[in-house]
Image (cartoon, rainbow, N blue to C red):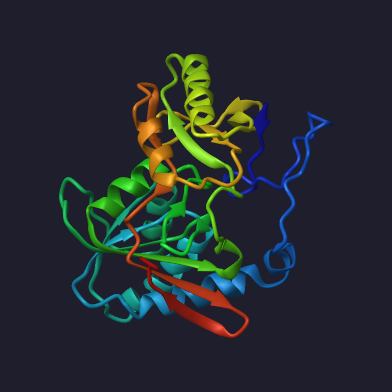
Amino acid sequence: MRHRLNRAGAFDPRRKDVRSPGTVLVPDPFEAIEGMDATQLKFEAARAALAHVGDGMRLGIGTGTTAEAFVRLLAEKVATGLAVVGVPTSERTAVLCRELGVPLSTLEETPELDLTIDGADEIDPELSLIKGGGGALLREKIVAAASARMIVIADRSKLVDTLGRFPLPIEVNRFGLRATEIAIGAAAADLGLAGPVTLRMTGSQPFVTDGGHLILDASFGRIPDTRALSEVLHSIPGVVEHGLFIGLASAAVIAGDGGAEILHAAR
């Protein structure tokens, strides 16, 4: 099975593959929010997160449409004198930062960061995340781990009781792809999880990450034990990284009709 990307190059679980008439759309109970004022909510969350950015900070800058809203607001502050340096989590983000005049560095030059601000595909009450819809999960996780703090920005549609409604992105090596896919399915089955594991496509070709890897999207549904799944996926040689971000986010800025609120993990 193959998954289609939206115009921004991100995986969209609701989009139907026009070449596969039998493909079933994943229902989205928040479709009205996404369709009516999604852009406004992204900017609202990004603006609230920007209040946590101070002069002289070393920033990790995420990937995706919400992170891009943050970059645009950050660039406005930089233009009026805010002194920061950013480490982008993707080539896509780097291009936007350069276009807008946000100073950039690399993790080789700036290996310790003060703060990373990034979006998420799902957020649970403990601030564990599913990320990777934009295809940058490996670099996003490396940058987040190098940061003293990570603030997630999103709208309320991303909040879930249990992770798994959004298919879990798993970045894999090209070599042994089929063997890795089988191993992922078997490891999931041992944890009582089941569902299609599909190669992400862009057009007629596999989607390729900035690191030259492929992505498998695993539609397991609810994942009751995210730590156990994380551990077994890391034990599979062909898995480079997965989109479960556990224990990395220190806060989440969530935008809704009533404004933005800051959430902290329910430990």
Quadrant where the image shows the N terminus: top right
User: Is 86 drawn above or below residue 52 in the view shown?
Assistant: above
Judging depth in this view, the residue of 265 and 37 nearest the camera is 265
| Residue 135 position in % (x across, y down) | 48, 42
Q: How many marks?
A: 0
Q: Tell whether 16 sits left or right of 13.
A: right
Tell me: 5 left or right of 70: right
Q: Position of residue 119 (x, y in %)?
A: 46, 60
Q: Residue 228 lies in what quarter of the image?
A: top left
Q: Residue furthest bottom?
A: 258
Residue at 50% across, 80% down:
260
Q: Nearer the viewer, residue 65 or 190?
A: 190
Which percent across, then down, holds residue 56? 18, 72
Vertical relation: 132 (above or below) 29: above
Q: Position of residue 92 (x, y in %)?
A: 44, 48
Work out whether 26 lies above or below 23: below
Query: Residue at left 32%, top 66%?
Result: 250
Q: Residue at x 76, y 44 (%)?
A: 25
Q: Residue furthest right?
A: 21
Q: Is residue 264 left or right of residue 120?
A: left
Residue at image coords 49%, 26%: 184
**Image quadrant occupied by the C terminus:** bottom left
Q: Nearer the viewer, residue 59 or 26?
A: 26
